[in-house]
Image (cartoon, rainbow, N blue to C red):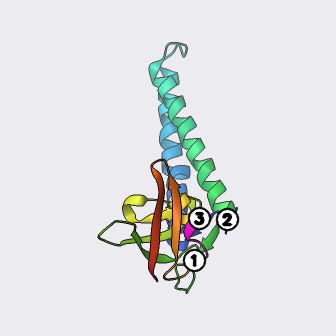
Amino acid sequence: MQTTSEFISSERRVELEKELKELQTVQRKSVIEKLEFAKSLGDLSENAEYHSAREEQARLEERIAKIEYVLKTSKVMERHSSSTVEIGSTIVIKKEGASEPLKVSVVGTEETDMLKGFISHRSPLGAALLGKNKGDTVKVNTPKGAIGYTIISIE
């Protein structure tokens, strides 16, 4: 079950909206001030402060555009429980040969963070788990070969 939509949690949406506001107000103003100061130093062709401020402005505008795109195109998904793995599901899986189970949440690509246990619905493991039920085993192809995971529970 592969999907082409992007998904974010309501918490992530709030974080992105807050970051966007900060970037558009405080950060933009700061970069403009740096550009004005650098321009006042004279010759722009060899003005390191000016070139640095322009690069900072480009990075800032790129981040603003990315956040605006994510907010505009993503669907908000809620964490929920179901008998089938879906985007927003938190599941406990056990890797073949592992002694301890692993708790993961299937999320949209914008929220992926393996250290926190958030796996993308588009990752090999996330895609393999979608649509599966408690007790099912999935195989995921990796560079070291196929690895099996068994679904212990779906929260």
Q: Nearest the camera: 97 or 22? A: 97
Judge from the rendering whether residue 104 lies leftward or rightward of residue 98; answer left or right: right
Q: Nearer the viewer, residue 68 or 78?
A: 78
- Between the C-alphas of marks 2 and 1, the distance is 13 Å
Q: Quadrant of the N terminus?
A: bottom right
Picture residue at 45% right of the left edge, 74% below the top: 150
Quick check: marks 3 and 2 in contact, CB under 8 Å?
A: yes
The picture places residue 64, in percent across and down from the top left corner, at 59, 49
- Left or right: residue 93 versus residue 32 is left
Q: Nearer the viewer, mark 2 or mark 1?
A: 1
Q: Secondary structure at mark 1?
A: loop
What percent of the width, then of the height, locates residue 108? 57, 64
Name the residue nearer the viewer: 130 or 54.
130
Residue 107 lies in the magenta stretch: no
The residue type indicated by label 1 comes to Lys
Instruction: Give the residues in magenta.
Output: 127-132
Question: Is any part of residue 96 visible from this angle?
Answer: yes
- Label 3 crowd bin: few (<14), some (14–19), many (20+), radius 10 Å: many
Rendering quarter of residue 98: bottom left
Name the amino acid type tagged 2.
Answer: Gln
Q: Secondary structure at mark 3?
A: helix
Q: Where in the figure is residue 124, as x and y percent of width and height?
A: 55, 58
Q: Residue drawn at (43%, 70%), measured in percent from left and top?
A: 104
Amino acid type assigned to the residue bearing label 3 in the image? Ala
State if disc 1 and disc 3 touch (CB < 8 Å).
no
Please identify the quarter of the rendering in which residue 84 is found.
bottom right
Q: In this figure, which residue is indicated by the disc labeled 2?
A: 2
Say which mark, if any, is on residue 132.
Answer: 1
- 128 in the magenta segment: yes
Q: Which mark is residue 127?
A: 3
Residue positioned 63% across, 48% down in the render: 65
